[in-house]
Image (cartoon, grey):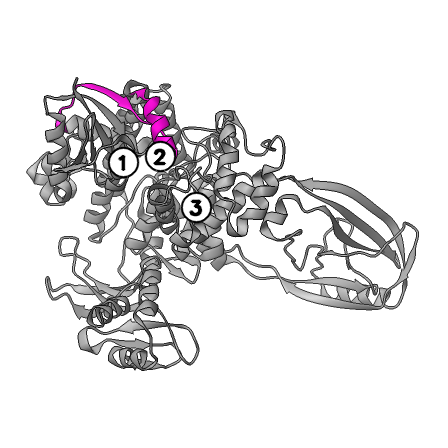
């Protein structure tokens, strides 16, 4: 009897599967066992060929050679990982291998990783698919006991292949056309350009916005307060004289309670996490980037095996997962989660109405804890934060609703109407998981929740004091990564046509949960956007790029339609070859539009310093890690760091310090004027008695905070080595 080859996506997953299947002998790019041989990719081992592989003329970027439309897309082995591809390919040719199990990530991109390797290596044998949502030993065993035929996922592969080829055809052609036309490094794509357009559009709205003053009239009645509202129930007045006139009219006057309404209400817990919602909350609470959150989730999924598959767009589970919930609750019943988990376990049966919905689960269910018992001390600080978000949401969604009584009071004072409202908690329910009963945001124009005394209709009270509070209308907020992810997931607000909004609502929006983080990172890396605090600002390059790209390429409607077509292909409802032909035609139209355009691109960040390699004047840009000089010539690629933001704090004003200079001249600087040489910093650190453990903790924090990476971390690592 022959052996079974198992192809995983990463070495860490291969080791886990090998341990479960009893494979213990290390081989060349694999782990050997009596029945199974486990091998792995390193992400993608195979990719679509670059244009120059089809024709040598494409080695030079010339407008006359566009569009590039190969009759058949070719695959090439990625040079950096070619050794592992050779190892996998050799295993597929072994005569004792009877069948293959695809065990790459259970999703569209994971399917593409495996199928392209199989195609390039020439695999034609029997193939099965391992489809699991967590990496626990029990899940792996169950998955291998219920392997699927790979043919069930052929349409998923066709969808992934169509997505990749469409990106090649549209992205590479438009990027080359824009670069050749404007002699600048300009890139466009089917998802990143509409995303950039949203950021630019928001910035333009902010710039055009003119703040308008408004006024609220607040009356104090001793035990509570109320706000004036006009006949349209609006608390804002845009004329100061009118607001002050009302304030004078009601000062020290008697008020009658016209109505006292009490209403029982309940609020269901929020749904379990999908990837996008988790990335949003992690950005809001911890300022983690979308990519950083995904990386931490991957670690919790693959390495620690504590959470289920991260790249999901579902916020519910199916009925078949319900029997596993008690074991998952017992696994997390430690530390701060013990009391809530045990309280839920005492429910017979468990309340699952807020987490189970078979119709709303796609390839993978929501992100929830696995049955793996957790050792919280084994997690890094950042992993613990993400784990905490997921576990608390899991506990919340299995808890009862939050029940409260809402009281609304309307008062009449000299024929002017004032309102007050308050809430009284009956049952904290799921909010008890978060250690709070009420989570109301106070705003100036909306009535604030407050504890109200016993009040009855017809009762009279007296106005003790009145104040007019001035505010100003605010422009729309700039995007953060959290709000940008929301806008990408649901870009219907960018669309006026009701039918197109309906189309967008039925798709995953711009990109997928698995790709959105990378799209945002690409925009940062290409210097089209920059981060200031938590806010995302478009750069001059980004604004100009949106202005010069063909109009429909920055359309959220078009991009969402493409994603909808890809989903139809995955479900067998559309043909991938038809979609690709449409993309070939579309790429040709886009190139023609760029050629015909009279738009102009101008570098407004040119320095007076020349590139040491090619002699062109360098550009001054702001990247994720600080300022740098880069060469505008695409083929040159020279770049030099000017300053990097670190996590070291200024001893005077406590702001983050910048690192400037190179080599022995490296120096910390601060906006307040503080300066300190790196050598002096090291000496001060030693004098302060910082031990290796302190420095090690600092270095670990640097690894997950890109803003702090760089020279400081390198120097501290060197110090650690010298002081072993």
At x 17% / y 17%, what residue is drawn? Answer: 1
Q: Which mark is residue 374?
A: 3
Q: Is residue 279 magenta?
A: no
Other-residue count near label 3 (Cα within 10 Å), few / some / many at <14 / 14–19 / ≥20? some
The answer to which image quadrant residue 126 occupies is top left
The answer to which image quadrant residue 468 occupies is bottom right
User: Which one is nearer the viewer's eye here, 431 or 556?
Assistant: 431
Residue assigned mark 2: 137
Residue 285's x, y, as percent?
A: 49, 55
At x 27% / y 66%, what residue is drawn? Answer: 713
User: Label 2's element?
Assistant: helix
Other-residue count near label 2 (Cα within 10 Å), few / some / many at <14 / 14–19 / ≥20? some
- Is residue 521 placed above or below 590 in the rendered structure? below
User: Which one is nearer the viewer's eye here, 312 or 71?
Assistant: 312
User: Is 411 displayed left or right of 562 in the figure?
Assistant: right
Q: Is residue 131 magenta?
A: yes
Residue 626's x, y, as percent?
A: 31, 65
- Mark 2 and mark 1 residues within 8 Å of each other at the beta carbon: yes
Nearer-N-terminus badge (2/3)? 2
Q: Which stretch appears magenta? A: 121-149
Residue 527's x, y, as percent?
A: 30, 56
User: Label 1's element?
Assistant: helix
Nearer-N-terminus badge (3/1)? 1
User: Which one is nearer the viewer's eye here, 624 or 683?
Assistant: 683
Residue assigned mark 1: 19
For this orientation, the residue located farthest to the left is 56
Nearer-N-terminus badge (2/1)? 1
User: Label 3's element?
Assistant: loop
User: Is 279 displayed left or right of 97 in the figure?
Assistant: right
The answer to which image quadrant residue 718 occupies is bottom left
Label 2 vs label 1: CA separation? 9 Å
Label 2 vs label 3: CA separation? 14 Å
């Amino acid at each position: 009897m022959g052996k079974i080859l198992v192809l995983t996506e990463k070495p860490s997953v291969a080791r886990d599967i090998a341990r479960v299947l009893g494979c213990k002998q290390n081989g060349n790019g694999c782990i050997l066992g009596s029945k199974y041989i486990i091998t792995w990719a390193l992400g993608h081992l195979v990719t679509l060929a670059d244009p120059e592989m089809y024709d040598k003329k494409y080695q030079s970027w010339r407008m006359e050679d566009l569009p590039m439309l190969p009759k058949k897309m070719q695959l090439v082995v990625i040079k950096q990982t070619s050794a592992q591809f050779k190892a996998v390919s050799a295993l597929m040719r072994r005569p004792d291998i009877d069948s293959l199990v695809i065990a790459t990530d259970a999703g569209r991109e994971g399917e593409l990783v495996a199928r392209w390797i199989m195609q390039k290596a020439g695999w034609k044998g029997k193939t099965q698919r391992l489809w699991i949502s967590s990496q626990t030993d029990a899940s792996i065993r169950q998955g291998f006991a219920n392997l699927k035929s790979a043919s069930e996922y052929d349409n998923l592969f066709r969808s992934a292949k169509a997505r990749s080829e469409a990106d090649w055809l549209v992205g590479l052609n438009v990027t080359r056309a824009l670069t050749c036309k404007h002699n600048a490094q300009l890139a466009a794509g089917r998802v990143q350009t509409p995303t950039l357009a949203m950021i630019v559009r928001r910035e333009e709205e902010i710039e055009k916005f003119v703040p308008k003053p408004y006024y609220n009239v607040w009356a104090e009645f001793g035990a509570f307060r109320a706000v004036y509202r006009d006949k349209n129930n609006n608390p804002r007045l845009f004329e100061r004289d009118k607001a002050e006139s009302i304030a004078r009219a009601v000062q020290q006057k008697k008020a009658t309670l016209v109505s006292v309404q009490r209403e029982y209400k309940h609020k269901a817990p929020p749904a379990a996490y999908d990837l996008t919602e988790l990335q949003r909350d992690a950005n809001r609470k911890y300022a983690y980037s979308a990519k950083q959150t995904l990386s931490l989730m991957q670690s919790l999924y693959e390495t620690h095996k504590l959470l289920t598959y991260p790249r999901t767009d579902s916020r519910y589970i199916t009925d078949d997962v319900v029997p596993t919930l008690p074991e998952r609750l017992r696994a997390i019943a430690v530390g701060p989660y013990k009391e809530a988990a045990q309280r839920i376990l005492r429910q017979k049966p468990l309340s699952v109405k807020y987490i189970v919905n078979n119709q709303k689960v796609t390839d993978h269910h929501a992100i929830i804890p696995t049955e793996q018992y957790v050792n919280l001390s084994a997690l890094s600080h950042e992993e613990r934060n993400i784990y905490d978000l997921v576990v608390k949401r899991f506990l919340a969604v299995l808890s009862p609703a939050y029940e409260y009584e809402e009281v609304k009071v309307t008062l009449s004072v000299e024929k002017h109407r004032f309102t007050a409202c308050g809430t009284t908690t009956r049952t904290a329910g799921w909010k008890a998981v978060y250690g709070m009963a009420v989570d109301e945001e106070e705003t100036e124009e909306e009535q604030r929740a407050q504890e109200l005394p016993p009040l009855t209709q017809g009762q009279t009270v007296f106005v003790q004091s009145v104040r007019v509070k001035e505010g100003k209308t605010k422009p729309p907020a700039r995007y953060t990564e959290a709000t940008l992810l929301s806008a990408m997931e649901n870009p219907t607000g960018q669309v006026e046509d009701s039918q197109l909004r309906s189309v967008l609502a039925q798709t995953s929006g711009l990109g997928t949960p698995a790709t959105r983080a990378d799209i945002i990172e690409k925009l940062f890396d290409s210097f089209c956007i920059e981060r200031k605090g938590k806010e995302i600002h478009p750069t001059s390059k980004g604004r100009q790029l949106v202005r010069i790209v063909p109009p429909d390429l920055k359309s959220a409607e078009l991009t969402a339609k493409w994603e909808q077509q890809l989903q139809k292909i995955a479900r067998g409802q559309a043909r991938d070859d038809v979609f690709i032909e449409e993309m070939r035609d579309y790429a040709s139209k886009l190139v023609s539009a760029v050629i015909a355009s009279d738009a102009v691109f101008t570098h407004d960040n040119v320095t007076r310093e020349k590139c040491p390699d090619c002699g062109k004047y360098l550009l001054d840009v702001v990247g994720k890690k600080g300022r740098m000089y880069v060469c505008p010539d695409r083929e040159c690629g020279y770049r030099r760091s000017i300053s990097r933001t670190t996590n070291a704090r200024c001893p005077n004003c406590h702001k983050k310090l910048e690192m400037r200079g190179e080599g022995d001249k490296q120096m910390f600087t601060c906006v307040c004027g503080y300066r300190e040489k790196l050598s002096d910093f090291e000496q001060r650190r030693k004098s302060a008695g910082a031990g290796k453990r302190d420095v090690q903790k600092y270095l670990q924090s640097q690894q997950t905070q890109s803003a702090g990476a760089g020279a400081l971390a390198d120097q501290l690592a060197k110090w650690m080595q010298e002081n072993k």
